[in-house]
Image (spheres, helix red, strand yellow):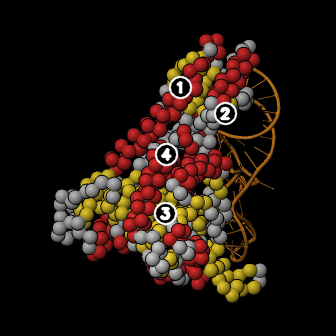
Amino acid sequence: MKKFKNFSKWFDEILFNADILDNRYPVKGFAVYKAWGFRIIKNIIEILEERLNETGHIPMLFPVVIPEDAFAKESEHIKGFSSEVFWITHAGDRELDKKLLLRPTSETAIYPMFALWIRSHADLPLKVYQSVAVYRYETKATRPLLRMREFLWNEAHTAHKSWEEAERQVAEAVEIYNSVFKRLGLSYLVLRRPDFDKFAGAVYSIAFDAWNPDGRVNQIGTVHNLGENFAKAFEITYEDLDGSHKNVFQTCYGFGLSRVVAAIIAQHSDDHGLILPPDIAPIQVVIVPILYKGATHEVNAYAREVYEIIKSSGIRVHLDTDEDKTPGEKFYYWEMLGAPVRVEVGPRDQRERKVTLVKRVDLKRIVVPLEDTVTAIKDLFNEIIRVLEERSSSTLKEIIVDAEDQSSLSDIVKLNRRIARVCWCEGVECAEKIREASGGEIRGYRIDVEEKPEKPCIICGREAKRIVYVARAY
RNA sequence: GGGGUCGUCGGCUAGCUUGGUCUAGGCUACGAGGCUUGGGCCCUCGUGACCCAGGUUCAAAUCCUGGCGACCCCA
């Protein structure tokens, strides 16, 4: 199945064949994470949480249920989420006096507790996180990993003394996410969302939009500056040095674990299957013994020796000892699962005390002496992530196309399935017309580089304020 | 939110137009055995399916209605 020709089928096949996720669970929008997929997710969580810990975030676990009155406290927030909330109305055969909802996001679960915990300036900043599932009754068609009604994410929530401190926290969050995405070799746009598309309850929102082979964008992370909005609603105040009581300033940010896995598959994998960045591969190196009749004992013993050497270096290595499968079968199997490096050990290698290394990104072979194996593998890991990053970023560049006028805008987004780069006046009416003309949405303007519009607004012809990116989204 | 296509072994599918010859054929996977093993080898045997609920009919995988689910297009 071809990745760029029929993305949807290709994607579903990889999910199934690489043991990532089984979408046959009999509830729409819910699916089972299989062993390989879940191990990948756990590795991503580990990398992310390590960065969060390093930067003073603390792990906690808040309940999945939220009482209706807490959910309703911030008026913009409830407007934004109420239409997609799962409600718990009954327990056994009794109707609950107070309805409960399954968290669609955890602000309203966490901030009542913040109000209790934060008393003084000395309690600030407070930075907490959790990696959990959240629930949203998506009305659009659900898609495995990309749009689920139950999805996994890591969310962080912070409280600060001032707007400036919250602004610095936003920058730190963006930096943390960038550093994790870099280790995964992902390419994406870091966009400030237009006001009409910000998080419900936020002052402003920044989002990470990853490219997808079908031209849509996949929002893999968001960072919000909440200002005092939730502090006012939940009465989260602190006593300052001078004895006065003030609202806290808050930020929150979410890292979409399910969608990051989707982005890794979508951006890196090929028609042989998955290609995993070494940092998150459950098995980084697989050893395939090549057995011939009469030499099996020597080769097996040598393969075991190679295995012990690699394992003792801390690399996640697996020795595939199944003698009922041919080496060719094993090659295809491990390529489907995306193991970054394969070590072939045959009679020739054994005689010469060498190993044959093959990297998944291009399937090229090199032969190295046994004593150089670990160094050579580590070099390959570095090369692999570099190649993945380069490939992905060059595809992103190809996918972004400047829209000269309304008809080319339509062609870019609808016909050619790309991301359009558009000059916009920031008028809401023009945004609506951009939506109609393109079939996509204004995703926002870049914050990592300053882009000055060199042309007037694509719709009204008046002075453009921003260069924005327009694409269809998941 | 609107429109369309579709649902058959674990996976991919043939059959449906024109109801009966289909308690269903192929490939793959899985299990047993043999032969092989530097890219899916070959042979033998075995396991395994008509989404659910109604309806029409002497007879339903096939036609109709509804539900559930999947995918595509448009807003």
Q: Amino acid at mark 1?
A: Ala
Of the image marks 3 and 2, the number of the one nearer the N terminus: 3
> Disc 3 is attached to a residue of which chain?
A
Answer with the quarter of the image where residue B34 lies. Answer: top right
> Label for residue A58?
none
**Residue at point 66% right, 85% down?**
A98
> What x and y, as percent, mark residue A438?
32, 64
Q: Are marks 1 and 2 on the same chain?
A: yes
Of the image marks 4 and 3, the number of the one nearer the N terminus: 4
**Along the horizontal axis of the image, is A464 left or right of A36?**
left
Separation (CA) of disc 4 from disc 3: 19 Å
Q: Are marks 2 and 4 in contact (CB under 8 Å)?
A: no
> Label for residue A318?
2
Q: Are marks 1 and 4 in contact (CB under 8 Å)?
A: no
> What x and y, as percent, mark residue A350?
65, 15
Mark 3, residue position: A253
Q: Is residue A389 visible?
A: yes
**Residue at point 29% right, 75% down?**
A428
Task: Between label 3 and label 2, give the one nearer the viewer.
Answer: 3
Measured along the vertical axis of the image, is residue A430 above or below residue A395? below
Of the image marks 3 and 1, the number of the one nearer the N terminus: 3
Answer with the quarter of the image where residue A456 lies. Answer: bottom left
Q: Amino acid at mark 2?
A: His
Q: How many marks?
A: 4
Of the image marks 1 and 2, the number of the one nearer the N terminus: 2
Q: Amino acid at mark 3?
A: Tyr
Q: Are marks 1 and 4 on the same chain?
A: yes
Measured along the vertical axis of the image, is residue A243 above or below residue A178? below
**Residue at point 58% right, 41% down?**
A281
Q: Are marks 1 and 2 in contact (CB under 8 Å)?
A: no
Mark 4, residue position: A184
Task: Between label 1 and label 2, give the one nearer the viewer.
Answer: 1
